[in-house]
Amino acid sequence: MIESWIIGTLSRTLAYGTPLLLGTLGEIYSERSGVLNLGIEGMMSIGAVSAFATAFLTGNPWLGMLVAGLAGGFASLLHGLVSITLRANQVVSGLALTMLGLGLSGLFGKGFEGKPLQSTIPNISIPILQDIPYLGEILFNNQNPVIYFAIVLTPILSFILYHTSIGITIRSVGENPAAADSTGINVWLVRYLCVLTGGVLSGLAGGYLSIVYRPAWTQGMTAGMGWLIIALTIFSSWSPVRGLLGAFFFGALIHLSFRLQPWVSPGLLKMMPYGSAIIALVILSLGKLNRKAGAPNALQQPYIRGEK
Amino acid sequence: MRDKLPFEIKKRQNPSGLGVITVSFFALLGAFLVASIVFWAYGVNPIQAYIVLFSGAFGGIYEISETVRRAIPLMLAGVGLVVAFRAKFWNIGAEGQLLLGATAATWVALFSPFPDFLLIPGMFFFGFLGGALWGLVPAILKSKLGINDVITTLMMNYIAINLILFLVQGPWKGKHQWGFPYTDKFPESAQLGTIAGTNVHWITLIVGIISAVLIYFFINKTTPGFEIRVLGSSPSAGRFAGMSYVKTSLLVMAISGGLAGLAGVGEVAGIHHMLRNPSELSLGYGYTAIIVAWLARENPIAVIMTSLFFGAILAGGDTIKISLGLPFQITDVFSGLILFFLIGSEILMGYKIRWSPNND
């Protein structure tokens, strides 16, 4: 009884952690290039509504995911334009993106509210692997392909960041844009592409919410996940693999905040992920892991050629 | 190449007041133009939408009063945010601080042993305290441990929302509310008076205007205000001069959170007369106040004007919802666009454009 409860919880943790993971991976890339994007909540929302609308109208959930990625990417370019090209404050620009994204998705999602999605992305079980005791049941039995996509993406993005010239380019732009510029790197282009990556992944995270996680669209369904992702990015020390661990840890907390509701007040339970995020940051900073453990040096600094 | 252009672009040190107003005006105009595209895409004639918006905000005495009553929380929270932003403290948590002020006021109204005549002063006092405490947590975490203020203030918002949900569904759930998640109604002596025929709880309005003036003098004419400005523009210079970053951060966030808390007091004591679901309580005032403070260019007196401006958008947005059937989220679209245009145009303020056709 207890055993199956634990296995069930762990297995569902993957489903709850996946949107956090997708968003965190994207934000890590954006911030590694020096651009903080607080617009995740807005981009996820836009992704969620456009995915749902597409899947609802065409009956094709995969097309919905594709549109979600495109919509998220498009939205992120707005942040790029304002914070990279116009060199405006990244914090405020991100907030503006969140407001605009929540507003637009509420506006254009109104007609889809409460409608059921006929065709969603079906869960799959992986033969042979699903028979492994415990692990098979948790990881390989009746899970969604998007979850595997996010998990497989993690080591790939980690490898690119740490072991390829693309990764070195991105990190150097985030650490010292002037030096990167002097070696012939196009700082603006790199930043735009990283912000775009973040936008596409946030859009996908939103699409996952409205197509897989809860096949429906409701206003406010992102429910602060976008902000948790910002915290997770710090918590991960800007490393994709640690981002994965953090995302699933918080996925578990979110899942538990639903699962424990028969016993504890939902209000108290729903405080848990947000409170834990603060506690996690306190532990991280008390751990003397260096206050800015891994923060890109030029984070939040617009790049102006010829000025230090 | 540059010589061929009929104008010169020069860098300037301090943008002039007139320049700031001109650029802000065009930024707002730009935001409204883009918003017309949104209206049009939604199948609503933009001109009609703006007429409805305007008449909903200024069309008559009642409409104006609705604008003013929405400006009240924006003014209080906005003035508080000016203090925080002056010190470069990213307080994105006015929403949560407002809600804590509302919670503390509710405690005074329903559960405290205060005599009747002390209820209203007590609500304002404890409301300020509640908001201040909610603001102090991120201040301590940032100044002592270097923890990112954006994240903590935001997380505190969600904790506040769920705290209220917990209270109104659980221990504070009203006995006379037919099972709805509300507290009981406040006693008469804990309700703020309104100007006859309107929802304007004038006491909070006066508190808001006085706060704006006091904060103006506090920032510009007092020693702690001077320290806030110095530490905000150059923390290292401030520290070198012996100023305490920790002390200033705590002071700034106590004021900022406290004023947002007062905004919450006004909402529960002046409008709702009970604590209820946060989304019905606040309409995102704490977030809109960020733009209110930004548009005021960190000038507390200007916040009085900018809060009225956004009060008008919220009141007009309500009318648009009712008469054109657009969701209320249209106001978020306005907020986002206005903020984008404001900060996007800031780069123009750093430069001077001079018409000089003969400079070749």
Image (cartoon, rainbow, N blue to C red):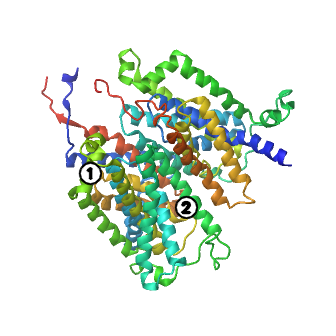
**Residue A234 visible in rendering:** yes
Q: Dot 2: few (<14), some (14–19), or many (≥20) neighbours within 10 Å?
A: few
Q: Quadrant of residue A20?
A: top right
**Residue A204 visible in rendering:** no
**Along the horizontal axis of the image, is B184 left or right of A9?**
left
Q: Residue at x 45, y 27 (%)?
A: A191
Q: Amino acid at mark 2?
A: Ser
Mark 1 or mark 2: which is in front? Answer: 1
Disc on res. B125: none
Tell me the chain of label 1.
Answer: B
Q: Residue at x 65, y 67 (%)?
A: B169
Residue A3 position (above or below residue A34): below
Q: Residue at x 43, y 51 (%)?
A: B140
User: Which residue position is annotated with label 1?
Assistant: B227
User: Which residue position is annotated with label 2?
Assistant: B279
The C terminus of chain A - image quarter: top left
Q: Nearer the viewer, residue A242 or A80?
A: A242
